[in-house]
Amino acid sequence: MPVPASTARTARTVRPAALAATALSALLLAVGTALPAQADAAGQGFRPSHPERDFAGSTVVAHEGRGAAGGLQPMVTQTRGLDVSSYQGNVNWSTARANGGAFAYVKATEGTGYTNPYFAQQYNGSYNSGMIRGAYHFALPNASSGATQANYFVSHGGGWSADGKTLPPALDIEYNPYGATCYGLSQSAMVSWIASFSSTVHSLTGRYPTIYTTTDWWTTCTGNNAGFGANNPLWIARYSSSPGTLPNGWSYQTFWQYADSGTFPGDQDYFNGALDRLQALAG
């Protein structure tokens, strides 16, 4: 069901086998040992300096550029959608729906110190237009633990309900807009951070989060880890005529962000399947 506007206003301030339980426990224990130097030890929440400019794909072009557009020849039906953040402001959802948009992902939070001030208009507006919608979190792994950010996300719009119109919560994990590409974390520490975020979202909502990333970032910062494909849907970013080589562990993408502008406001996306499969994912 839609998030009440009053609640949103208050919140503004593989296919391969799954990881063995023991391995996942080790990852989570690793997260708890120490946080990077920029962690918020006081628990007041790291406040990024330009969160309104951080959104799914905001760092992609600078690092990976754009390939040749057009010529898409999918093996299965693709369903069109979009993703938005505060950068788009108030969105005309009736027009986006009329132009063929079937789903939307909306940025809810970043780190533990930012909520999208347009979240209610975007999240509820897409729902009311007839779209299937979901919320995503822009990760800052050097600011606090994966579990801490997952709790903040779910408490500020990142929940899930079995209404058939809500996508799994999503984690946007990409190039650091504030500094070092991998946020100062080693590959093993990054895998641990993502595992902590994922397992916490699952425990709070019953759904494993969709993971938004690029193959290059994933390879560089996780060592092309294969441990998430069994549970976490993949939302791949690549601005070209095909999704290209996918990160290790996924044999197909669930979502593909294929352009940063186009018919819809914000970024342009495909769901890798027909509308009934999108509805099944939401349900």
Image (spheres, rainbow, N blue to C red):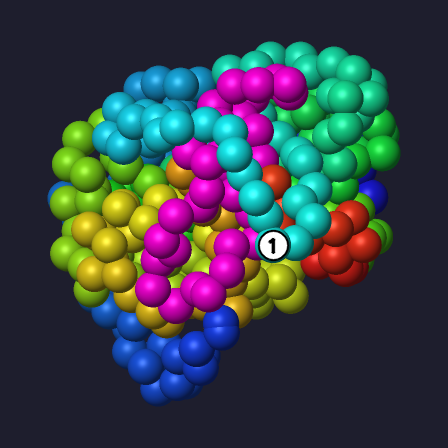
Residue occupying image coordinates x 15% and y 56%:
186
The residue where tag 1 is placed is 75
**Front position in the image: 122 or 120:** 122
Q: Residue at x 66, y 54 (%)?
A: 76
For this view, does 221 lie left or right of residue 140? Answer: left
Quadrant location of the C terminus? bottom right
Q: Is residue 234 visible?
A: yes
Q: Is residue 144 magenta?
A: no
Give the quadrant of residue 162. bottom right
Residue 114 coordinates in the image, percent (x, y): 46, 29
Taking the spot 26% from the left edge, 24% from the top edge, the residue there is 62
Task: Assess disc 1: are there few (<14), some (14-19) or many (≥20) residues with their C-alpha within 10 Å of its C-alpha.
Answer: few
Residue 74, percent from left and from top: 59, 48
Quarter of the N terminus within the rendering: top right
Name the amino acid type tagged 1: Met
Q: Please state if 142 lies on the left or on the right of 66 as rendered.
A: left
Secondary structure mostly seen in magenta is loop
Residue 164 or residue 202, whichever sits in front: 164
Compared to residue 203, the image places residue 2 above or below, namely above
In this picture, which residue range is highlighted in magenta? 240-269
Q: Position of residue 92 (x, y in %)?
A: 74, 14
The spot of residue 136 in percent (x, y) is 54, 41
Question: Does residue 189 appear anywhere in the picture?
Answer: no
Q: Secondary structure at mark 1?
A: loop
